[in-house]
Image: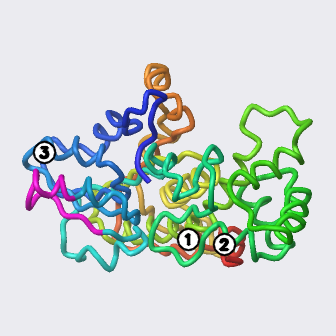
Amino acid sequence: MNATINLENKHFPVLLNELISIISPLYGGTFIDCTFGQGGYSKKILENKKNSIIALDRDNDVLNYASKFKVKYKSRFNFYNNKFSQINKIIPKDKKIKGIIFDLGYSLNQIKNPQKGLSFSNKGKLNMKMGINDLSANEVISNMGEHNLIKVFKVFGDEKYSKKITREIIKKRKEKTIKVEDLVEIIDSVKKYQKTKIHNSTKVFQALRILVNNEITELINGLIFSFRLIPIGGIIAVVTFHSIEDKIVKFFFKHYSEQRNTSRYLPEAEVSEKCFKVVNKKPIVPSIYEIKQNPPSRSAKLRYGIKTRDNCDFSDFRQKFKNLIEVEGLR
């Protein structure tokens, strides 16, 4: 799920220069690219022959790009076709990792692929599976109960018309299997008099993608396991593209970079140690020039933290987003 693209169908890793300056690959080291995609970030890091990359991606379609990297960079590049929530099972703990990067966007190839059914511009079967999935959007739309479907659209899409859209879906699915174009038509029929800056189907499709790919749990686990994997001084950097992702990442870095009471019943002096050093309090966003070159990058936000201690209790991290995790569990 790497890098957005501009309207000329060119591949642009978002905030590339900013991310490279943060992880400082100039002096050499091993880096993990958790969302390899077409390899934009990995390629830039590997320009320095002192660097090596361990790359992950759940999408089978990136295997062709990964194999070309392996031929070119040999032992400096290793690829795993796996979800980044499995990073702790793939990378040995004694491996010295200088930085771990996540780009949570979708590439042009993924969006345009009709088999994936990620875009409301496509036609055909609803899918949205990014790889290593046990659920498709077709199964959700065809089988999920009304109450749960409403909740998914409302929580993951912030869709104001979730009830009306769901009721129309329930009616339509009794007649036929709902395809991409049918779902778009249903949403348009409900929102036909509404004036919005975004496409009518954006929120519903976002909600389905999150649910189908278990994106909330994936991200939370990926961040926690990444922290445990890197040494003190290691960097975790994440590029997000929508508000739910950014809330999770913001909390992860902000909450664990501030001294706070370990319990509300303890005196103010008794505080837990910080797990991260956060240099930039606000997210790094694309420049006006980058947005002109690559309009989809306008929603990107880059946040990062530098690990400052070995052990950290992330129970309150999971608790903070318990509601999102529970909705994802409806799948």
Residue at image mark 1? 217
The front one of 226 and 272 is 226
Q: Earlier in the sequence, mark 1 or mark 2?
A: 1
> Which residue: 57% across, 63% down?
260
Q: Which residues are magenta?
A: 67-80
The front one of 88 and 256 is 88
| Quadrant in which the C terminus is drawn | bottom right
- Amino acid carrying mark 2 in the image: Glu
Q: Where is residue 233 shown, x and y percent of the image?
A: 27, 57
> Which residue: 40% across, 63% down?
59
Q: Check disc 1: other Cα within 10 Å, few if <14, some if 14-19, many if 20+.
A: many
| Quadrant in which the N terminus is drawn | bottom left
Residues tagged 1 and 2 counted as in contact (Cβ below 8 A): yes
Secondary element at tag 1: helix
| Residue 328, numbered circle | 2
Q: Is residue 127 left or right of residue 178?
A: left
The span from disc 1 to disc 3 (Cα, nearest Å) is: 34 Å
Q: Is residue 79 left or right of residue 27?
A: right
The front one of 273 and 5 is 5
Q: Main secondary structure of the magenta part?
A: helix
Residue 138 against residue 35 in the figure, above or below: below
Residues tagged 1 and 3 counted as in contact (Cβ below 8 A): no
- Amino acid carrying mark 1 in the image: Thr
> Which residue: 63% across, 61% down?
126
Which of discs 1 and 3 lies nearer the camera? The answer is 1
Q: Is residue 214 left or right of residue 67?
A: right
Q: Earlier in the sequence, mark 1 or mark 3?
A: 3
Q: Where is residue 133 shown, x and y percent of the image?
A: 51, 74
Secondary element at tag 3: helix
